[in-house]
Image (spheres, grey):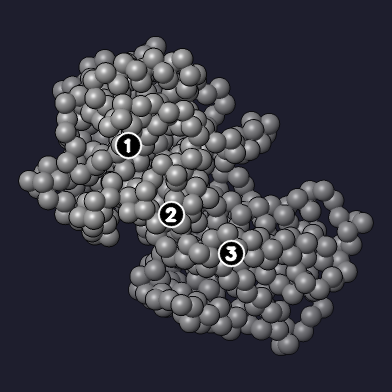
Amino acid sequence: MKHAAQIATAVVEHTPGKLLHVDPRRGTLTDTRIDALPELLRPGDLLVVNDAATLPASLGGTVRGEQIELRLAGEEPDGTWRAVAFGAGDWRTPTENRPPPPVLAPGDELRLGPGLRARVVSRSEVSGRLVSIRFEGPAERFWLALYPRGRPVQYAYEPLPLSLARVQTPYAARPWASEMPSAGRPLRVELLGRIRSRRVGIATLTHAAGLSSTGDPALDSALPLPERYDLPAATVAAVADTRRRGGRVVAVGTTVVRALEGAALARGGDLLPGPGVTDLRIGRGFVPRLVTGLLSGVHGRDSSHFELLSAFLPGPLELLYMLHTAAGGYRGHEFGDSTLVLG
Amino acid sequence: MELRGAAVIVTGASRGLGAALAEELGRAGARLVLVSRDHEALDAVVDRIRDRGGEAHGVVADVSAPESASRIAGTSGALVGPAEVVIHNAGTLGPVPLAPLADTSDGDFEQALGTNLLGPFRLTRALVGSMALRGRGMVVLVSSDAASTAYAGWGAYGVSKAALEHLGRIWDAELSASGVRFLTVDPGEMDTRMHREAVPEADPSTLLRPEEAAAKVVDLLRKAP
């Protein structure tokens, strides 16, 4: 019971985080607070957020009587789920130290709690821990059983179990994300209101943010896996309108960059509304066509997100950024501080 | 507002006003997520709506539990899409039979606040961010005249409903500019299990049927801009 109370109190944080504003045009880095974000945007700019809610994607269960943890890594258009299996244990052990799961084969039955059973459809060639599974019964039964049973994917640096509420952005809507699209976590409703009142547009898309790491080197090097997105017509129109008027399109999170740039690339540069899947990998040297700026977390050099961040940072600023965030005590994890790259 | 196709969450939907609201909204073509602790009674309501060609999904949850809000929001987001309307109808009296405040236990008082106030607060919080970004949404709070009149014996309930109404006013002050609307309704005295528990001696023929009250609430929703 004590745990429950401690979890519940942490749903909304009141201490605004730090924001490092990197202006790639001027070559400057400025320390500020996330609360100052509205003043860093100009009337006519557009902020694009990922409204994916975070799934209770971690399921404990058994296969052939052996304990496993299964992390859902995305639903496929055919209704199967991509999932990554871990051996016995839980998040308190960093993923790289977790024992491997039993070898999974097509046809294996996964027992994941009352009303929640799945069968392995196929195993990935990248890693035996990445499987495609199909849940028994209609989709409604799956969703109704998932929420009481699943837990959010948990990070080893967090000692207490994370509540599902804590891993939602303030505007979470559709449960597509395996892990929180965390760049948007500091965008509280009050802050969004102030941004709007500056005549900065806010548009949404949904992008199925996948797992950030699995502890399996072969699999981690293949991340991010192809992820699905859905672009509302209003967002496509807002992006076009903003660009036509000379405003800046600011992506909140790397998932938004992937969705917008991936969707445009797939159609020869044209952004069209509707659903899609992108396998776009963005890194150093990538030239964004639509996105002008990026609000993201603070990323260390060893993280996959840093690769994406570096697409927005000219070479010399990359090193400055690393030195500055380290010296400035910026917190780098999902509940940490923020970076705005915008000139 | 157009109810046909609208994603609507109704709490306390297994009986009384909640079940009547669900059936009325089902007839209006809403896509419903119905919440109750009572699995069997909830299934019966869901089945009745489906038998008439409506769409309804039953989520078994206790709105007073802290983890329920994100579960309800997530499940409904998956099954019917982002909620356009949420009707906070689940309610509890506190001590039964009703008791003066001096005889009300901590547990009964906390239960009334948990179900009638904190539950709606948490579920609203889980939904309004998305509503505000989309520029539309309707939050309906089911209240009572016990929120404004100090009836002896209705302490836990009356206090929780008074606070609920004020919660709605403050949400409205904070979010009306974003297009999210808050509607507090007092359906009046109805012939429900809760009313029988509160006033066992009442003559049912003098009370409103839940179906009549539900029709009025749904009418208010239809007429809302």
Question: Which of the pair A9/B189 is nearer the observer?
Answer: A9
Which chain is indicated by disc 3? B
Few, some or many C-alpha atoms within 10 Å of disc 3 (few <14, some 14-19, many ≥20)? some
Q: Quadrant of the N terminus of chain A?
A: top right
Residue A101: % across, % down:
33, 19
Q: How many marks?
A: 3
Residue B70 vertical placement versus A300 (above, below): below
Residue B13: % across, % down:
55, 65
Taking the spot 92% from the left edge, 56% from the top edge, the residue there is B102
Residue A165 vertical placement versus A332 (above, below): below
| Residue A334 visible to an observer of this rendering | no
Asked whether disc 1 touches disc 3, contact meaning CB atoms under 8 Å apart, the reply is: no
Residue B27 vertical placement versus B7 (above, below): below
Residue A246: % across, % down:
24, 51
Give the residue pinned by disc 3. Answer: B172
Q: What number is the disc on residue A198?
A: 2
Q: For residue A289, what is the image quadrant?
A: top left
Question: Which of the pair A18/A316 is nearer the observer?
Answer: A316
Taking the spot 64% from the left edge, 65% from the top edge, the residue there is B169
Distance from the alpha carbon under mark 1 to that under mark 3:
34 Å
Asked whether disc 3 touches disc 2, contact meaning CB atoms under 8 Å apart, the reply is: no
> Sequence-wise, which precedes: disc 2 or disc 1?
2
Give the residue pinned by disc 1. Answer: A342
Q: Amino acid at mark 2?
A: Arg
Taking the spot 7% from the left edge, 46% from the top edge, the residue there is A268
